[in-house]
Amino acid sequence: MNSVGANCNELKQEYDACFNVWFSTQFLKGNNSERMCAPLFKEYTECVKEAIKEQKIDMKEIEKNVLNTEEEQKKPTGQR
């Protein structure tokens, strides 16, 4: 899956690869320290934040809680 910003795809792939190694070699063996991939994660999230700004994505709309509300039952605009 690609990132929200095309210029973040390479960073996402690097972070995903690091995460997969960390998960299999560290986490599954009881080490839950996230330091191994933290620098990549920080760089990737900064890229994503910038892409969100550039694309004028409304974060309030994304973060809005609709589960178990009447709004959850509404059909998306343009749907039958």
Image (tube, rainbow, N blue to C red):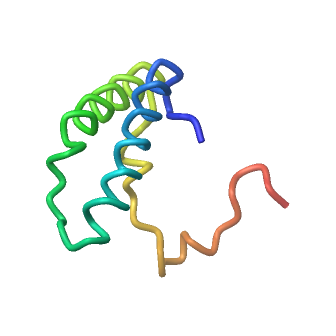
Residue 29 vs residue 20, the one in the foreground: 29
x and y percentages locating residue 7 in the rendered image: 47, 18
Residue 44 vs residue 15, the one in the foreground: 15
Q: Is residue 40 above or below residue 33?
A: above
x and y percentages locating residue 28 in the rendered image: 31, 71
Q: Is residue 78 left or right of residue 57?
A: right
Q: Residue furthest right?
A: 80
x and y percentages locating residue 6 in the rendered image: 53, 22
**Which residue does the image show at 47% across and 74% down from the upper left?**
67
**Which residue does the image show at 51% across and 34% down from the upper left?**
3
Q: How many marks?
A: 0
**Which residue does the image show at 37% across and 54% down from the upper left?**
63
- The quadrant the C terminus occupies is bottom right
- The quadrant the N terminus occupies is top right
**Which residue does the image show at 39% across and 58% down from the upper left?**
64
x and y percentages locating residue 22 in the rendered image: 30, 54
Q: Is residue 59 left or right of residue 66?
A: left
Q: Is residue 19 above or below residue 42?
A: below
Residue 33 lies in quadrant: bottom left
Q: Residue furthest bottom?
A: 68
Q: Is residue 6 above or below residue 62?
A: above
Residue 45 lies in quadrant: top left
